[in-house]
Image: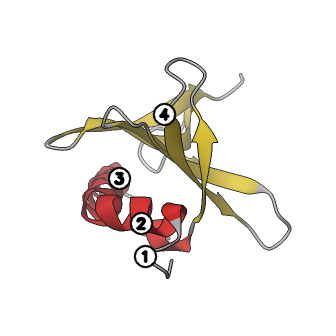
Amino acid sequence: MSSADDPVASRYAALADLAGDIADRLQDVVDKLGFDAAPITLHAPDDAVFRLQRDPSDGRDSLVGEWRDECGIKFGELLFHADGSFFVEHDIGRPHPAKPRWFVEAVNAWGREGQIKAEARLLRMPE
């Protein structure tokens, strides 16, 4: 992100501290799952590519960031609405380290500044 004349960069700059707090909270969730043998480090918000996108519910622009791998496959998203609410998701895609019948699909965070809620999204493994 660079120029103050760039609306995407300006919007991200205003949210950078919140994005960092969200990333820290998501990393805490991952760390508590117990991936000690093969630790998982989530990507930083700065690693995402951001754009503005019109929110159909209120007509205002939301800031949307996507994390993609080198092949262009999306593995996470940051969504900051104009009303101050957000939703962030980062894929994990590994079996749960302590629960053999469960798979950790992703970690999610939602809320607004000062109110960050986060959890892992688990899927039951097929029998």
User: Would residue 14 appear left or right of 72 to someone viewing this image?
Assistant: left
Q: Is residue 82 visible?
A: yes
Q: Give x and y (percent) for residue 31.
A: 32, 59
Q: Which three-letter amino acid code belongs to the residue tagged 4? A: Arg
Do the CB atoms of the residues marked 4 and 1 lie less than 8 Å apart? no
Q: Height in image: 90 above or below 72? A: above
Q: Quadrant of residue 56?
A: top right
Disc with the residue nearer the chain's start (2 vs 1): 1
Query: What is the crowding at mark 4: few (fewer than 14 residues within 10 Å), some, or many (at least 20)?
Result: some
Q: Amino acid at mark 2?
A: Ser
User: Which residue is tagged 3?
Assistant: 26
Nearer the observer, 126 or 32: 32
Element on which disc 2 rests: helix
Q: Cα distance, mark 2 to mark 1?
A: 6 Å
Asked if residue 39 can be seen in this view, the reply is no
Residue placed furthest toward the top:
57
- Comparing 67 with 58, the one in front is 58
Q: Secondary structure at mark 3?
A: helix
> Foreground residue, 63 or 31?
63
Q: What separation in Å lies between label 3 and label 4 (alpha carbons)?
A: 12 Å
The residue positioned farthest toward the right in the image shown: 71
Q: CA distance from mark 4 to mark 2?
A: 32 Å
Tell me, for residue 94, which label it has, or none: none
Q: Find numbered disc 1 in the image and state the secondary structure of the residue it sits on.
A: loop
| Amino acid at dot 1 | Ala
Question: What's the CA distance linking mark 1 and mark 3?
Answer: 29 Å
At a point 47% along the width and 73% down the height, the residue shown is 46
The picture places residue 11, in percent across and down from the top left corner, at 41, 59
Q: Which residue is mark 1?
A: 4
